[in-house]
Amino acid sequence: MKNTLLYPVACCCALLILLILIPERASAQRQVVQLSGLVVAGDSAAGMVGVAIFVPNSNRGTQTNRSGFFSLPVLPGDSVVVAALGYQKQYLLIPETFTGDSYSTLLHLLESPSELPTVDVMPWATERELREAISKVKIVEEQEPQVNLGPLEQKDLTKMRAMDAETNARYGLAQTGRQQQRRYMVPSDIKLTGISIGTNKKASRDRKKARKASKSSD
């Protein structure tokens, strides 16, 4: 009789233990990924300071330092938002199948111009009309940022170019060199007092020799 009563109790205890262990095992499988990288504006090589990087609907977030670098712990399946005032937001989608423990990336933010409301005031308007015009101005209230992943571009971390400190330094030096070359490059078709400044020096020497030969023959 006692064995008959103990058997259902033992089954219930085993079921409760399984229900407790299954969620813990599932959460343990979601390994934390340390996301880090550099945020720059457009094609610039200089990092952006104060850019917000956060996971919506959570308390996980950070911002870039003075050099533009950031580091944030995320989980597979998270959607990371990268936002800065005056720039378009970017969204990084971390795949559920991501198995690494860290990832570094380079992010380029594009400018997002916004127009402010204007008021046209005529020079012949009276003080009363000016006050009425000012009272009718409607200031657009800023709405709280809302995450909308529909039409926005999403990037897969596994398909983006990884970046470390050495790669970042090489990239910055290459960008600086290209900017200096474009700044000091002189087009070949520019002439000063009839002399070409470009690379066509051989043709200029040939013309000088031809003029000397014609003078000597005369």
Image (tube, helix red, strand yellow):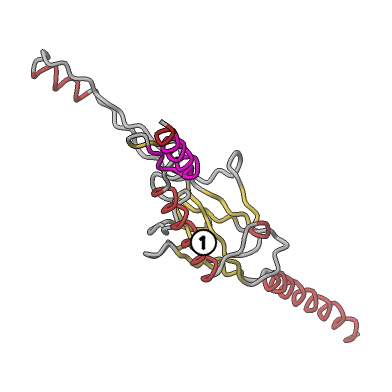
The main secondary structure of the magenta stretch is helix
Among the 4 quarters of the image, the one containing residue 65: bottom left
Q: Is residue 172 magenta?
A: no
User: Which quadrant does the N terminus fall into?
Assistant: bottom right
| SS of the residue under disc 1 | helix
Q: Is residue 196 magenta?
A: yes
Q: Nearer the viewer, residue 50 or 186?
A: 186
Examine the rendered structure and indicate whether residue 86 appears above or below residue 159.
Answer: above
The kind of residue tagged 1 is Tyr
Q: Which percent across, then down, holds residue 110? A: 47, 45
Examine the rendered structure and indicate whether residue 204 appears above or below residue 15.
Answer: above
Q: Residues within 10 Å of mark 1 (few under 14, many from 20)?
A: some
Q: Nearer the viewer, residue 47 or 170?
A: 170
Query: In this rendering, would 48 be left or right of 203?
Result: left
How many numbered discs?
A: 1
Report which residue position mark 1 lands on.
Answer: 171
What residue lies at 49% left-to-right and 47% top-to-bottom? 89
Query: In this rendering, would 13 be left or right of 217?
Result: right
Q: Nearer the viewer, residue 148 or 57?
A: 148
Q: Nearer the viewer, residue 124 or 209?
A: 209
Q: Which percent across, then down, holds residue 203? A: 49, 40
Query: In this rendering, would 91 be left or right of 87?
Result: right
Q: Which residues are magenta?
A: 195-213
